[in-house]
Image (spheres, rainbow, N blue to C red):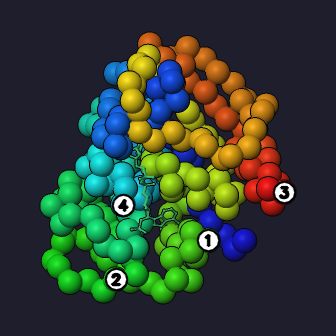
C-alpha cells in the first residue's frame, strides 16, 4: 500500500477471553500498573484511533495522564463513525485535544471537532491511514474495539500488538476479541507478568499472514 503510519494495537482481555461485559458494557480489565503503561504508550504516539462502538460503549477521553506526558500536545483522537451515530456529548469530543471524525454523513451539528465526510473509498482504512500519514501522523495507537481491530488485522496494517490479560473473569461476557472462525497458533512473541495480569506481545505480521491465508481458504 501507499505510505501509512506505524500502527500499534493495545487491548485488554479478561481471563476468560472477553474485552467487555454483557451487551458490550464497559468493564475495567487493566490493573493500575497497566493503565500507567497505556498512558505511556499514548504519550509516544501522534494519534489514537477507535471506532464508534467504543465511543458509545466506553465513552473514553483518550487523553494522556500528566505523569506520562512527553509531547507538547495530546495525541489527535481519530474516530471512525461512518453513520455519525456517536453522541455529540461524548467525552472524546471535548476541547482537551484535537479530534477528527471520519464519516459518510454530512455534518449537521456543532460538535467541537473536525468532521471529515468521505465516500466509500475515502473511508477505506488504507485511504484514511495514507491521509493521516501525509499530515504528519507517523505513529498511531489503535485502542479498539473488536470490529476496528479485526479490520486492521484483515488489512494487515498492524506493526505492534499488545494484549493485556487482566486478573478478572467476566461473567456472561460480551465481546471476544478473536473469533476468526478457524484455528490460529504460534502467534505469541513474548509474555511477562505485569502487575496482577500478563502482558502478551503478539507477532502481528505472523498473525495477520495466518489470518489472511485462512480467510482466503475458508
Ligand atoms: N478491553 C479493551 O481493551 C477494549 C477496548 C476498546 C473497546 N472495548 C469494548 O469493545 C466493544 C466495542 O467494540 P465494537 O466492535 O462494537 O466497536 P468498535 O470497533 O470500537 O467500533 C465499531 C464500529 O466502527 C465503525 N467503523 C468505521 N469504520 C470501520 C472499519 N473500517 N472497520 C470496522 N468498523 C468500522 C462501524 O460503525 P459504523 O458503520 O456506524 O461507522 C463499526 O460498527 C465495547 O464493548 C467496548 O467496551 C474493549
Indicate the position of residue 72 as horizontal and vertical percent values: 33, 52
Q: Is mark 1 within 8 Å of ligand 1?
A: no
Q: Is mark 4 within 8 Å of ligand 1?
A: yes
Q: Secondary structure at mark 1?
A: helix
Nearer the observer: mark 3 or 2; the answer is 3
Indicate the position of residue 181 as horizontal and vertical percent values: 68, 46
How far is disc 1 from disc 4 in space, using C-alphas?
18 Å
Residue corresponding to mark 4: 52
How far is disc 2 from disc 1 in space, using C-alphas?
19 Å
How far is disc 3 from disc 4 in space, using C-alphas?
30 Å
**Whether residue 14 can be seen here:** yes
Name the residue: 31% across, 38% down.
Answer: 26
Indicate the position of residue 49 as horizontal and vertical percent values: 44, 57
Q: Classify the position of the C terminus by image quarter.
A: bottom right
Residue corresponding to mark 2: 105
Question: Which of the 4 image quarters holds residue 6?
Answer: bottom right
Mark drawn on residue 217: 3
Amino acid at each position: 500500500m501507499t505510505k501509512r503510519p506505524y500502527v500499534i494495537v493495545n487491548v485488554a482481555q479478561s481471563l476468560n477471553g472477553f474485552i467487555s461485559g454483557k451487551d458490550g458494557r464497559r468493564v475495567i480489565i487493566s490493573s493500575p500498573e497497566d493503565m500507567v503503561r497505556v498512558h505511556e504508550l499514548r504519550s509516544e504516539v501522534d494519534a489514537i484511533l477507535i471506532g464508534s462502538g467504543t465511543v458509545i460503549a466506553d465513552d473514553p477521553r483518550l487523553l494522556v495522564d500528566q505523569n506520562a506526558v512527553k509531547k507538547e500536545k495530546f495525541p489527535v483522537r481519530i474516530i471512525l463513525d461512518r453513520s455519525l451515530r456517536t453522541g455529540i456529548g461524548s467525552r472524546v469530543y471535548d476541547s482537551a485535544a484535537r479530534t477528527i471524525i471520519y464519516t459518510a454523513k454530512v455534518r449537521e451539528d456543532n460538535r467541537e471537532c473536525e468532521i471529515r465526510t468521505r465516500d466509500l473509498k475515502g473511508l477505506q482504512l488504507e485511504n484514511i491511514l495514507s491521509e493521516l500519514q501525509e499530515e504528519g501522523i507517523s505513529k498511531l495507537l489503535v485502542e479498539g474495539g473488536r470490529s476496528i481491530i479485526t479490520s486492521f488485522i484483515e488489512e494487515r496494517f498492524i506493526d505492534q500488538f499488545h494484549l493485556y490479560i487482566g486478573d478478572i473473569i467476566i461473567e456472561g461476557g460480551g465481546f471476544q476479541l478473536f473469533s476468526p472462525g478457524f484455528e490460529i497458533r504460534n502467534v505469541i512473541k513474548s509474555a511477562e507478568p505485569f502487575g496482577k495480569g500478563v502482558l502478551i506481545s503478539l507477532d502481528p505480521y505472523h498473525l495477520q499472514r495466518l489470518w489472511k491465508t485462512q480467510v482466503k481458504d475458508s
